[in-house]
Amino acid sequence: MSTFLSRHFTARRLERGLRPVDLAGLCGYRNRAKGANRIMRFEERGEIHPELLAKLAVVLGVEQEQVAELVRQD
């Protein structure tokens, strides 16, 4: 099940015209397919490792305060 947090990050990715595999590359994954799978799992189920969440926030320009607010809403 998606969450407020995951839906927000999905919207930011789509606004930038990025596919999950593109975003994985920008987050530093050498194995972009593996990274893309983790990103898609986050977008679909809301499951994410804190380190990946931090990288996604930087790449997509999401402020930490906004992340914290979305987490509170979830």
Image: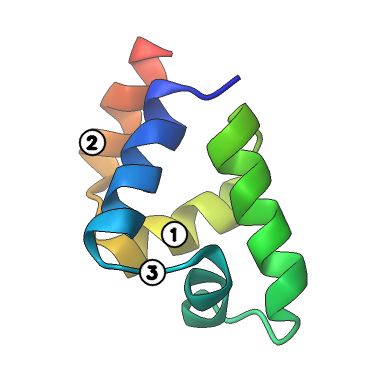
On screen, residue 57 above or below 1: below
Q: Dot 3: within a 10 Å radius of its alpha carbon, few (fewer than 14), some, or many (20 or more) residues? A: some
Tell me which amino acid carries mark 1: Leu
On screen, residue 47 above or below 26: above
Q: Going from the N terminus, do you reach mark 3 or mark 2 first?
A: 3
Q: Quadrant of residue 28?
A: bottom right
Using the numbered discs, state the Cα–Cα distance from disc 2 to disc 1 in whole angstroms: 13 Å
Quadrant position of the N terminus in the picture: top right
Using the numbered discs, state the Cα–Cα distance from disc 3 to disc 2 in whole angstroms: 21 Å
Tell me which amino acid carries mark 2: Gln
Q: Are marks 3 and 2 in contact (CB under 8 Å)?
A: no
Residue depicted at 58% across the width and 57% down the height: 52
Q: Measured from the top left, where is residue 14 in percent x and y?
A: 32, 56
Q: Would you name the residue on which mark 3 appears? A: 18
Q: Which mark is residue 66?
A: 2
Q: Dot 2: within a 10 Å radius of its alpha carbon, few (fewer than 14), some, or many (20 or more) residues? A: few
Q: SS class of the residue under badge 1?
A: helix
Q: Quadrant of residue 25?
A: bottom right
Residue lying furthest bottom: 30
Between disc 1 and disc 3, the foreground one is 3
For the image, the number of numbered tags is: 3
Q: Going from the N terminus, do you reach mark 2 or mark 1 first?
A: 1
Q: Which mark is residue 41?
A: none
Q: Measured from the top left, where is residue 35 in percent x and y?
A: 68, 67
Q: SS class of the residue under badge 2?
A: helix
Q: SS class of the residue under badge 3?
A: loop
Q: Dot 1: within a 10 Å radius of its alpha carbon, few (fewer than 14), some, or many (20 or more) residues? A: many
Q: Measured from the top left, where is residue 42 in percent x and y?
A: 60, 41
Tell me which amino acid carries mark 3: Leu
